[in-house]
Image (cartoon, grey):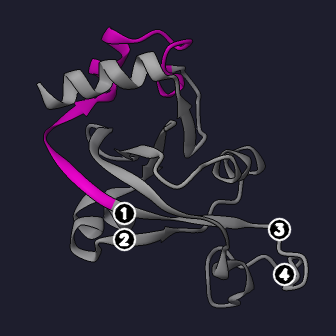
Amino acid sequence: MAHWLMKSEPDVYGIDHLARDGSTLWDGIRNYQARNYMRSMAVGDRAFFYHSNAKPPGIVGLMEVLETGLTDPSQFDPASNYFDPSSRREAPRWDCVRLGYLCTYPGLLSLEALREDFSPEELAVVKRGNRLSILPVPEASASRLLTLLEG
């Protein structure tokens, strides 16, 4: 089982939305590296839910990958902010995964706290200027994060 960190803005789609819905398509990814990370995910992988563009930003919950290799439907929807007119149904450019809710942590593990406990080599989200919305989390770092989050 691999671990990931996946960012979303809480006012767009936050952990409370996922808790309510139970599962969701993680769509709208329009960065090739982030898309490729999704393509390498496997059913059963775990993902830390990270609230970005929040005060403060940080890890708020845990998700599980339920389905992989799905075509992102938003690329074909002209009304979507993620519409891609150059993507074709016979050769879609963008993928997504289905994620299931596992838990909300009682307290946020802030970016500031993460920077105190992890180097950029251990956890890419602490690297200044990192804008990717999906990041791999090395196993040793995932174990430390789970210890910090679960107390």
Image point (43%, 16%), residue name: 140
Asked which quadrant contains residue 14, the reply is bottom left
Observer-nearest residue: 122 or 31?
122
Front disc: 1 or 4? 1
Front disc: 4 or 3? 3
Q: Is residue 27 left or right of residue 46?
A: right
* Disc 4 to disc 3, C-alpha distance: 10 Å
**Mark 2 or mark 1: whose residue is earlier in sequence:** 2
Front disc: 3 or 1? 1
| Range of magenta residues | 101-126
**Mark 3 or mark 2: whose residue is earlier in sequence:** 2
Image point (36%, 63%), residue name: 100
**Mark 1 or mark 4: whose residue is earlier in sequence:** 4
Q: Is residue 86 left or right of residue 17?
A: right
* Disc 4 to disc 2, C-alpha distance: 27 Å
Q: Which residue is mark 2?
A: 23
Q: Does residue 123 show up magenta in the picture?
A: yes
- Asked whether disc 2 touches disc 1, contact meaning CB atoms under 8 Å apart, the reply is yes
The secondary structure type at the circle numbered 3 is: loop
Q: Which residue is mark 1?
A: 100
Image point (54%, 20%), residue name: 127
Q: Which residue is mark 4?
A: 85
* Disc 3 to disc 2, C-alpha distance: 23 Å
Q: Which residue is mark 3?
A: 93
Location of residue 123 in the rendering, given as x and y in whole percent from the top left corner: 48, 21
Front disc: 4 or 2? 2
* Disc 2 to disc 1, C-alpha distance: 4 Å
Amino acid type at image mark 4: Pro
How crowded is the residue under tag 3: few (<14 C-alpha within 10 Å), some, or many (20+)? some
